[in-house]
Image: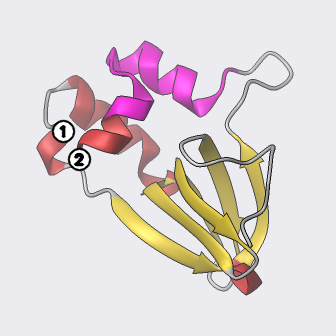
């Protein structure tokens, strides 16, 4: 049975994973008791991706559509501003001029 709000399909989220430790940003495709499905990227390559999108090299960005079993999910949070710091989606829009939702759908 799917879990309900505040997490719903299509929202931008950040997933913190363990074993191995990763932080993933992307569009939530599904969230269930067994795990979560996400289309996005590892935040270790954030700056490189922004630079590629600014240069118009969107087709070179390797987004992944992945399922993470719940035993790997340490935390999941909405991509929203916090303590005066913009969300990653807002940062993406400001620095690339591209809507992050469209970007994550297009590739």
Instruction: Name the image quarter holding the N terminus.
Output: bottom right
> How many tags in the picture?
2
Q: Is residue 15 highlighted in magenta?
A: no
- Mark 2 and mark 1 residues within 8 Å of each other at the beta carbon: yes
Pointer 2: what residue? 107
For the magenta stretch, what is the residue range? 86-102
Instruction: First in sequence, mark 2 or 1: give its number.
Output: 1
Characterize the magenta stretch by its predominant secondary structure. helix
What label does residue 58 carry, if any? 1
Q: Position of residue 73 (x, y in %)?
A: 73, 73
Vertical arrangement, residue 20 with respect to residue 97, above or below: below
Q: From the viewer's perspective, is 35 left or right of 65? A: right
Q: Position of residue 86 (x, y in %)?
A: 67, 20
Whether residue 80 can be seen here = yes
Q: Quadrant of residue 80?
A: top right
Q: In the depicted view, which residue is nearer to us: 12 or 53?
A: 12
Which residue lies at the image location 14% right of the left edge and 28% below the top edge?
56
Q: Quadrant of residue 96?
A: top left
Whether residue 23 can be seen here = no
Q: Position of residue 82 (x, y in %)?
A: 81, 26
For marks 2 and 1, give the CA distance.
8 Å
Vertical arrangement, residue 41 with respect to residue 86, above or below: below
What label does residue 19 carry, if any? none
Which residue lies at the image location 13% right of the left edge and 37% below the top edge?
57
Q: Position of residue 100 (x, y in %)?
A: 42, 30
Which residue lies at the image location 25% right of the left edge and 31% below the top edge?
53
Q: In the depicted view, which residue is nearer to us: 72 or 6?
A: 6
């Amino acid at each position: 049975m799917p879990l309900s709000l505040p997490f719903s399909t299509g929202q931008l989220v950040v997933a913190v994973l363990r074993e191995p430790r990763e932080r993933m940003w992307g569009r939530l495709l599904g969230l269930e008791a067994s795990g979560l499905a996400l289309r996005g990227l590892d935040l270790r390559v954030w700056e490189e991706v922004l630079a590629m999108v600014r240069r118009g090299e969107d087709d070179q960005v390797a987004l992944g559509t992945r399922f993470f079993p719940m035993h790997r999910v340490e935390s999941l949070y909405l991509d929203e501003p916090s303590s005066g710091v913009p969300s990653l989606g807002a940062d993406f829009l400001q620095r690339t001029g591209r809507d992050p939702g469209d970007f994550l759908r297009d590739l």
